[in-house]
Image (spheres, rainbow, N blue to C red):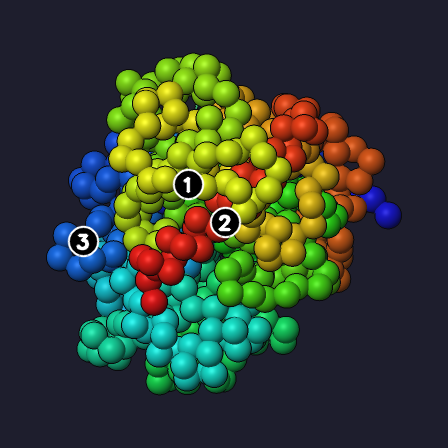
Amino acid sequence: MGYTLPKDSLFLGFDCSTQSLKATVLDANLVIVASEFVHFDSELPRYNTKDGVYRDPMVDGRIVSPTLMWVEALDLLLEKLEAKVDYRKVAAISGSAQQHGTVYWKKGSKAMLASLDPCKPLVTHVGDAFSLKDSPIWMDCSTTSQCREIENAVGGAFELSKLTGSCAHERYPGPQIRKIFETQPDVYNDTERISLVSSFMASLLIGGHASIDETDGAGMNLMDIKRRVWSKIALEATAPGLEEKLGKLAPAHAVAGLIAPYFVERFQFKDSCLIIQWSGDNPNSLAGLALHSPGDMAISLGTSDTVFGITSEPQPSLEGHVFPNPVDPTYYMVMLVYKNGSLTREDVRNQYAERSWDVFNKYLEKTPPLNGGKLGFFYKEHEILPPLPVGCHRYVLENLSCDSLGEIKEHEVQEFDPPSEVRAIIEGQFLSMRGHAERIGMPTPKRIIATGGASSNACILKEIANIFGCPVYTVQRPDSASLGAALRAAHGWLCNKESVFVPISCMYEDKLDKTSLSAKLAIPAGDRELISKYTLLMKKRMQIERNLVDKFGRI
Ligand code: ADP
Ligand code: XUL
């Protein structure tokens, strides 16, 4: 059965990502009618961030963002968007945020949130609301010892993965919270509530502490993935009294609350405007890309690179992540995450391609597929997958033309010529995605939908089609996360109206092409012969990667 949304209504979706806060507005036909963004570094220069973050020079791997910058960005974005959107028509708002970042609300902050004065900007009200000024974010990797402590306490990495959907990861809230409990006990004790970036932004909008949604909650090493409740054993392994500080979990399609009077008076939203639970950026992208069946794969090329798909039978492992599907409670999403995404590509571009994507693309076009056997591993940041420290490793492979893995030998080199550096980073990143996706049992993709900033680059998409051997699609806007959030706002509104869960596809079934959710073929599948050569190269790469992890891997 198809459902229609009220004719004149609008649905607003945000995405609080690493580098910017974005917004997308959908009308009742699920067509984008407006979008806007605030770029943190350039538009909020007083926070002095670089790429939206602070890298702590004193503590190796500690990466945080100023919590108040996100607060100020919300007011600023609403001011910018006001010229384009009649806020009185907005029936519901939802959002997306970088996953895993944590916000620490001080004791008494609930009362502060409940009394926001519309005459003054948000930032003046919550300036003193946090027990920790800067929020540890997904790029942080300073919690290795806490990861091991938590894993050991629950019976090992694989046990934790079976229980929560992932083994312990440095960027996950469980280890982050444990580190604060261990190293700053006063901060931990003074904390009334811990939010994820997603539930934090929802909290501002409802003027109260919003629940953490089950999907983003799965990315914490704290939630029982099967039962979708906090896991007592994981909580105990992390910090005392934690359950109370986390509050309740809620499904991603649930209503978090009505919009706070602050936004009604300051921006003229209707007081009946619903705030639907916010969730993580990757889950929101899954919704925004309308992924619906196993074999649909998405590659998001943002600050981080992620690969994700859908499954009904998740198999938690040591490398990927399992989350509940944010728009279908019967399914799960599986995901791989790379920290060295766009910023590492930019680094190679700046060093070898005159700081220009045009030159970068020219180099990609003039170098042959397989790069004459030049294979690179580029880690500008500590990598998650594989767990390797900062560094670059370059190899030249011999006998690549033969069919047997055993006969291909490698020798290490210091540097390639600039065009080969460019091809090496691109081929390396996508060969790794293919190798790891196969290893965690993601179905062979029938099609790939590319999204995120770098998906606007057709030369990069061509390499994806060649390496994976399937067609690559793109969407109207590379920012699928805020689009997914706007769609989820409409979905949550509908579920609330019907007082029952409504499958999201009912909203666009038979008319996907007329909505802004449709995907367009960007690059057809690559040549079959080339794909089998890439298969061999991928296997060789996985072998070398294993050796690198044995030699340099973080324990
Ligand atoms: P996030 O949402 O994580 O903040 P985005 O998805 O907005 O990030 O992506 C931003 C990144 O997109 C930039 O860091 C930049 O490297 C990359 N990007 C933008 N245009 C291109 C291009 N033409 N080719 C490759 N990468 C690009
Ligand atoms: C996912 C992850 C990143 C962030 C980036 O596990 O760490 O993709 O969500 O915003």
At horizontal 28% and vertical 18% (from top left) the residue drawn is: 354
- What number is the disc on residue 115? none
SS for tag 1? strand
From the image, tell me which residue sits under label 1.
410
From the image, tell me which residue sits under label 3.
56
Q: Measuring from the top left, give residue 137's x and y in whole percent.
A: 34, 55
Identity, as a three-letter code, of the amino acid under mark 3:
Asp
Near-viewer residue (284 or 278): 284
Between marks 1 and 3, how big is the CA–CA gap? 37 Å
- For the C terminus, the image quarter is bottom left
Q: Is residue 158 visible?
A: yes
* Tag 3–tag 2 contact (CB < 8 Å): no
From the image, tell me which residue sits under label 2.
542
Between marks 3 and 2, how big is the CA–CA gap? 32 Å
Q: Measuring from the top left, give residue 319's x and y in whole percent.
A: 50, 60
Left or right of residue 309, residue 278 in this image? left
At horizontal 43% and vertical 27% (from top left) the residue drawn is: 423
At horizontal 22% and vertical 49% (from top left) the residue drawn is: 55
Between marks 3 and 2 in the image, the one whose residue lies nearer the viewer:
2
